[in-house]
Amino acid sequence: MTKISLLLGALLAPTLAFATSLELPADARLEMQVIEPLVLDADTPERDDVLLRPVADGSGSHQVPDYCVMVGDARLDGDRIRLTTDSVTCIDAEAGDSHIYSGEISAAAYGSDGDFGIDACQDGRCELSPEHGFELQLASDLAIEEQANPSEQINIERRQANGEGVANPIPAEQPDPDQ
């Protein structure tokens, strides 16, 4: 599985900036969820490539849109799940155009009690469902440059009027290419 993440489309916090880069300050807290159920126990004490998404209208210090995926690793740490992230991909889909931001992120999960790791263990088995929210705190500033978006260029060509767009030609009087 490749380490990929799809994120960011709307801006809900003044310290989150889109343009030529996506920026979040160190110590920013985002409320997140796992995408698929996560189960750790003595037989399976760790799992790599865990996919995370932001909680809509989450309670963190910063909020990010729904179009976000982060990839991280989960480990048993006593009676808590230690979850850290290493990559993020975000899509800002505001105003009809899409802007893509993808790069590295250093962040760790904290439980509702504010302690490092997520308190989701009982009798040696730790479970995290997609409905369970937790805070992810950035360890350092995040600044990711916007990446080229080939589909945006294709959409621009399709929108061109009078058949001038490569992907949107107006059919000739004889649309059959064999005639």
Image (cartoon, grey):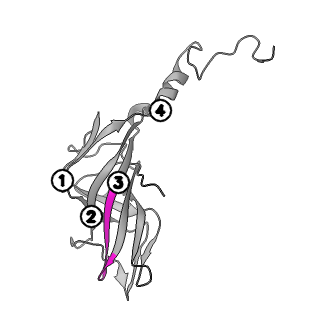
Quarter placement of the C terminus: top right
Q: In front: 64, or 1?
A: 1
Location of mark 1 (residue): 26
User: Secondary structure under badge 2?
Assistant: strand
Location of mark 3 (residue): 87
Cα distance in 3D space between marks 2 and 1 = 12 Å
- Name the residue: 41% across, 38% down: 93
Side (left or right) of 88 relative to 139: right
Query: Which numbered tag is attached to residue 82?
Result: none
Q: Residue furthest front?
A: 2
Quick one: label 1, few (<14), some, or many (20+) residues within 10 Å?
some
Q: In front: 119, or 167?
A: 167
Which amino acid, by three-letter code, is at mark 1? Ala
User: Secondary structure under badge 4?
Assistant: helix
Q: In front: 113, or 91?
A: 91
Side (left or right) of 15 relative to 76: left
Cα distance in 3D space between marks 3 and 1 = 16 Å
Query: Sequence order check: which comes first, mark 3 or mark 2?
Result: 3
Which amino acid, by three-letter code, is at mark 2? Ala
The stretch of residues the image draws in magenta is 76-87
